[in-house]
Amino acid sequence: MNLILALGIIIVVGFFGGVAARRLKFPRITGYIIIGILLSPSLLNIIPKEAVENLDIVTNIALGIIAYLIGGSLHWENLRKLKESITWITLLQSLGAWLLVTLVLALLGPLIIPNQTFWQWYFPMAFIIGAISCATAPAATIAMISEYKAKGPLTTTLLAVVALDDAIAVIAFAIALGICQPLVSGASNISFYQMLGVPFLHILESVALGIIFAFALMYISRLAKPRELLLVVVFGMIMLCAGVTSYLGISSILANMVVGFIMVNKVKRKEMFLVVEEIEDVLFVMFFVLAGLYFDLSVLKVAGILALLIVLTRCSGKYVGTRAGAKISHASDVVKKYLGLALLPKAGVTIGLVILAALEFPTFGAVMLNAVLASTIINELIAPPLTKYAIFKAGEASVKVS
C-alpha cells in the first residue's frame, strides 16, 4: 500500500470513528484508537505493517506540534500562582508510579515468570518499567483539553505536570539504566555520571535548543504579516526543531515545549498558536489512529498478566501521589479529587523508552517490551474517558456533550 492511500484511509475512517465515539458519549480520541486497532495488521490488516513503520514521521511531527501547544498553554502568571502544588504533585505522582510499579512487579514477577534470578532479572526489569511509568502522554492530554475547551485551575495544573513528566521520565530512565546495567552484568561499579550527569546534560541541551529556536521564531515571525504566512513560519520552525533534536539525540518534546512557553510569555500575539490550532484536529486523527495501528494481538497473549499489573500499579501510584501532593501543597478541592484521574494516558515517550531498554537488556527485553506495549494499548483505551470525567466533574469544560 502506498503511504498517501494509507494516510487517506487513516484520516477519513478515523473521522467516522471520532464521530461514533462522540455519539456514544466517549472522547473522540477513543474512537480514533479503536479505528487504528481495527485497521491494524493484527486484526483486519487494512494498513500493512510496512506502511505503519514508514508513517513514524507523522508521529514525530504531531508530537512536536503538540509539545509546542502545551508550552503555549503555560502562562507564567498562572504557573506562579500554582507553583507549590505543581511542584509537589509532579514529584509525588512520578515517584508514586515508579515505586509502586517496581515493588509489585519485582515481588510478583517470580509467580508470573518463574525460574529467574531476582537481582539480575526481576528487579532490573521492574525498576526500568517503573521508571518508564513516570511518563504521561502529552498528546492525549492536549487533545482532550482542546476537544472540550477546558480552562481552570485543574487544566492549568494538568498541563504543567504533563509538561514536566516527560523530563522526569527521561531522568528516571537514565538513572534506572545506570543502576541496572551493572546488576545484570554482575559488575560492582556504578557510574554516577551515567546515572545523573548524562540525563541532566540532555535536558539542558533540549532547553537550550528550545530557547534558540524560540528567539529565531520570534524574529522571523515579524516578516510574516499575513496570517497564512505565519502558519508556514511556525510550522516550519517546529519541524526544524524536531529534526535537529532528533539528529542530536535529545528531547524534541521538551525543546518544542520551551519554544511554545517562551512565545506565549514573550510575544503577545495569539495568532502564533491559533494558526497551529486550525490544523490540530487532522494531526490528532493521524496520531491516535497510528497509535492504535501498533496493536498486536500476540502481545496480549504473551504478557497479558504483566500488562494488567503495570496498568493497575501505575494508575494507583499516580492517583495516590497526586492526592498526596495536592494535600501537602493545599491545592484546590477539584485538583485533589480529579487531577489524578487525568494523569493516566501514556503513549509515545513510553514506547520509545521501552524500545531503548529492550535493546540494552536482551535477557528480559522481549518480555518487558511486550508487557509495556500491551499495557499502553489497555491504558490508551481507559484513560481518555477518565480524563473527560475529571474535566467535567471539575466544571472546566466549555463544550457540552451532545
Image (tube, rainbow, N blue to C red):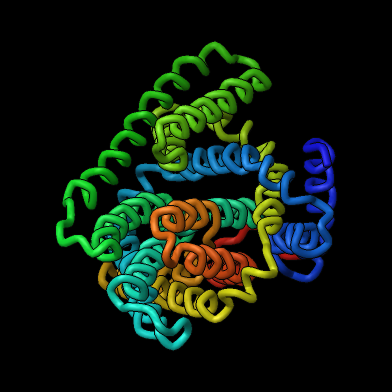
Q: Report whether 263 appears left or right of 33.
A: left
Residue 80, x across and y down, in percent: 30, 49
- Residue 108 x, y percent position in the rendering: 40, 85
Q: Quadrant of residue 32?
A: bottom right
Q: Outermost residue toward the top? A: 223
Percent across and percent down for residue 66 are 55, 43
Placement of 86 over or under 311, stated as above or below: above
> Looking at the picture, how far across and down is residue 194, in whole percent?
23, 48
Quadrant, the N terminus = top right
Front-most of 250 and 297?
Answer: 297
In the rendered view, tell whether residue 210 sits above or below residue 223: below
User: Looking at the image, which residue sits at the far bottom?
Assistant: 111
Q: Residue at x 37, y 24 (%)?
A: 212
Q: Residue at x 65, y 55 (%)?
A: 291
Q: For the point 40% across and 31% down, which residue is it?
A: 248
Residue 18, visible in the rendered structure = no
